[in-house]
Amino acid sequence: MTGFFLFLSVVQGLVAGLGVTVFVTIASLVCAAAFGFLLALLRQFAGIKFINLAIDACCEILCNVPALTHLFILYFGLASLGVKLTSITAAVLGLGLIGAAITCAIFRAGFAALPGGQAEAALAAGLTPLQTIVEILTPQAMRIALPGLGNYAVQLLKDTSVVSAIAAPEIMFFARSMVTSSFQTTMIYATAAALYLLLSLPLMQATQFLERRYGRLKG
């Protein structure tokens, strides 16, 4: 097989994992943003010490334990207890939970950046606390958080490579399988890197646009 046709076969083999990589990224991002936003709301506005401590503890554990450890617990650990998750389900759940801790901090920073007088003014105008949070504070906090969420999305896309360790059939899973059978290590991993780059570029461009749009970048 000539070099060109070998390269085409490598690309074809890796593209087989492209759909799973994109799906895991999107599904994990949705889970992370949804749960992270709820945690940020509770942490910022509940004012209950026990809840605050519980959220802080969970976020510390999720952020400071390697992602691979969480994935092994979900995929292999739960299976030993009789709860069998598919590799993709475990990947989405694991990355989504880790991401929830990260996005919680992003959303909290968005709320913390708002002037305190806004909530007081809204309450004085007759809005309920719930209306103040939903209609006044949340839209502004989301606007501030958008660039951070964009950066997290780019990082999440790259982090999906670790789910190959639990046999999720994404790009790196096929890359490792092809290296084992063909020993074309450099070509296969370089092609995999190029695919990740092609996926990351649109996200990075979107992130830079959001940063410029909301004043994070001055250039």
Image (cartoon, rainbow, N blue to C red):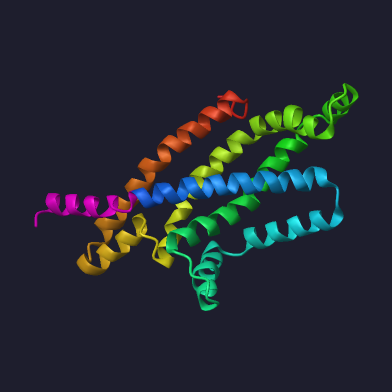
Left or right of 172, for residue 141: right
Quick one: 82 or 134, which is closer to the camera? 82
Which residue corresponds to the image point at 62% horizontal and 26% vertical from the top-left? 214
Magenta stretch: dominant secondary structure: helix
Q: Looking at the picture, how far across and down is residue 191, in whole percent?
A: 29, 51
Residue farthest toward the left in the current orientation of the protein: 1
Left or right of 132, for residue 15: left
Q: Is residue 15 magenta?
A: yes
Left or right of 200, for residue 30: right
Q: Which span of residues is magenta-colored?
A: 1-18
Query: Is residue 197 at least partly visible in the picture?
Result: yes
Q: Looking at the picture, how far across and down is residue 63, in whole percent?
A: 63, 58
Quick one: 27 or 95, which is closer to the camera? 27
Which residue corresponds to the image point at 81% horizontal and 43% vertical from the top-left? 45
Which residue corresponds to the image point at 24% horizontal and 50% vertical from the top-left? 11
Q: Quadrant of the C terminus?
A: top right
Query: Is residue 105 at least partly visible in the picture?
Result: no
Q: Looking at the picture, how far across and down is residue 206, in whole percent?
A: 48, 32
Residue farthest toward the right in the current orientation of the protein: 124
